[in-house]
Image (cartoon, rainbow, N blue to C red):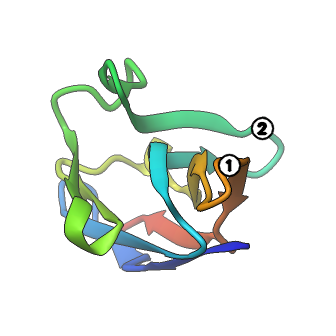
């Protein structure tokens, strides 16, 4: 079983910055994809940034403002969010999938962390 623990959400003014962290633990052999989704009230969950074997994919609305980075030695990803806008307000969920030591696939979601952009 794999667990994702998130941190770093909070309240920030428009134009400000926040950094989210997500650490994966458990029976991990390899992580295939890891990154962040978000869900605003009344809206569907959407991809924000996701690291895959082919590179990192960003939602168009965050490209150039958000940066996803990884520390493979710690099974951790970071989402640096700059120039935040009120439209970025949402619950941010970490996501990861991969293989366990028995080479079986797994996927996991974090519990979510609230990001509020408001003056």
- Mark 1 crowd level (few <14, some 14–19, many ≥20, 10 Å Cα): some
Pinpoint residue 95: horizontal percent, then vertical percent: 58, 52
Q: CA distance from mark 2 to mark 1?
A: 5 Å
Q: Quadrant of the C terminus?
A: bottom left
Q: Which mark is residue 17?
A: none
The residue depicted at 26 percent of the width and 26 percent of the height is 63
Residues under numbered marks 2 and 1 in contact, where contact means CB atoms less than 8 Å apart: yes
Inspect this view and state whether residue 71 appears. Answer: yes
Pinpoint residue 93: horizontal percent, then vertical percent: 60, 59
In the rendered image, the residue lying farthest to the right is 42
* Quarter of the rendering containing residue 71: bottom left
Pinpoint residue 33: horizontal percent, then vertical percent: 48, 40
- Look at the numbered disc 2 and give the secondary structure of its residue: loop
Pinpoint residue 1: horizontal percent, then vertical percent: 73, 73
* Quarter of the rendering containing residue 45: top right
Locate residue 53 relative to residue 83 in the image: left or right. Answer: right
Q: Which residue in the protein does label 2 denote?
A: 43
The residue depicted at 59 percent of the width and 62 percent of the height is 101
- Look at the numbered disc 1 and give the secondary structure of its residue: loop
Q: Which residue in the protein does label 1 denote?
A: 40
Locate residue 55 relative to residue 35 in the image: left or right. Answer: left
Seen in the picture, residue 95 relative to 109 is either above or below; the reply is above
Inspect this view and state whether residue 35 appears. Answer: no
């Amino acid at each position: 079983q794999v667990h994702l623990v998130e941190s770093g959400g909070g309240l920030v003014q428009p134009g400000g910055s926040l950094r989210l962290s997500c650490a994966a633990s458990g029976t991990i052999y390899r992580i295939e994809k890891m990154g962040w989704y978000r869900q605003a009230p009344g809206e569907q969950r959407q991809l924000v940034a996701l690291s895959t074997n082919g590179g990192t994919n960003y939602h168009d609305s965050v490209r150039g403002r958000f940066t996803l980075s990884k520390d493979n030695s710690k099974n951790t990803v970071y989402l640096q969010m700059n120039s935040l806008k009120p439209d970025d307000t949402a619950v941010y969920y970490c996501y990861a999938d991969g293989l366990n030591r028995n080479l079986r696939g797994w996927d996991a979601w974090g519990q979510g962390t609230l990001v509020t952009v408001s003056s």
